[in-house]
Amino acid sequence: MSPTTDTTTTTVPTVPIATATGSAPSPVPAARAAAAADSLLDLKVTGDLLPQAGQGALTPGIPWAGNMKFAVVSALGNWTTTVSLSPFRGRDTGRTVTPNATYSAPETNCAPIALLPLKKSPSVNIPKLTATPVDAKTGGGVACLTDWTATITIMVPNDNLLADTYTATLTHSIY
């Protein structure tokens, strides 16, 4: 009897490659372009949500107002921010409470760039913030550098609450 050997061969499918003079495109320019595009439209939170003068901790049944600072840098043309506020959720109980909340921001100017017309970002008043994002500040032009202080007013209902630490998330986005 002669010795036998088992051999396993793996076949790798082949893909025809067209040949051309020059080199294959590099993924580096695409990555750089994506990074550059990301920096052409930017929304920054430049301050925490701070209570207005005379405001203490958020107390159920009593309106609370705070201010938060934002800034936009845009070289892409028109832009829109959105804002939403999640329900409050109890850390220990998991209980959710939907607040009554508003959002407002004043009219601002896009910083002028030589030879370009001055553009404005109109004021906004959102009478009911919910967990669904709604359009807030808008702006545009060839370039826009602007900032504003938004006022957020929150009133948590004083019924059906359980002792707990509640948190909510205010989301501000730009497109």
Image: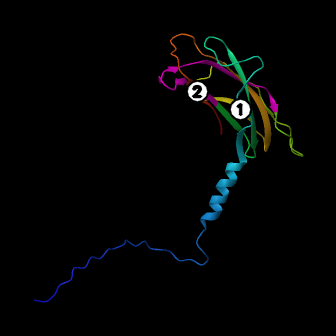
Badge 1: residue crowd in 10 Å (few <14, some 14–19, many ≥20): few
Q: The magenta stretch spans which residues?
A: 83-108
Q: Which mark is residue 129?
A: none
Tag 2 residue? 168
Three-letter amino acid code at the position of disc 1: Asp
Q: Earlier in the sequence, mark 1 or mark 2?
A: 1
| Residue 172 vertical placement versus 89 (above, below) | below
| Residue 114 vertical placement versus 99 (above, below) | below
Q: Quadrant of the N terminus?
A: bottom left
Residue 94 position, x and y percent, is 47, 24
Quadrant of the image occupied by residue 157? top right
Three-letter amino acid code at the position of disc 2: Ala
CA–CA distance between discs 1 and 2? Answer: 14 Å
Tag 1 residue? 48
Residue visible at 75% across and 46% down in the picture:
75
Look at the image and say whether residue 106 sits in the magenta stretch: yes
Residue visible at 50% across and 12% down in the picture:
160
Total marks in image: 2
Quadrant of the image occupied by residue 43? top right
Badge 2: residue crowd in 10 Å (few <14, some 14–19, many ≥20): some
Residue 108 position, x and y percent, is 81, 31
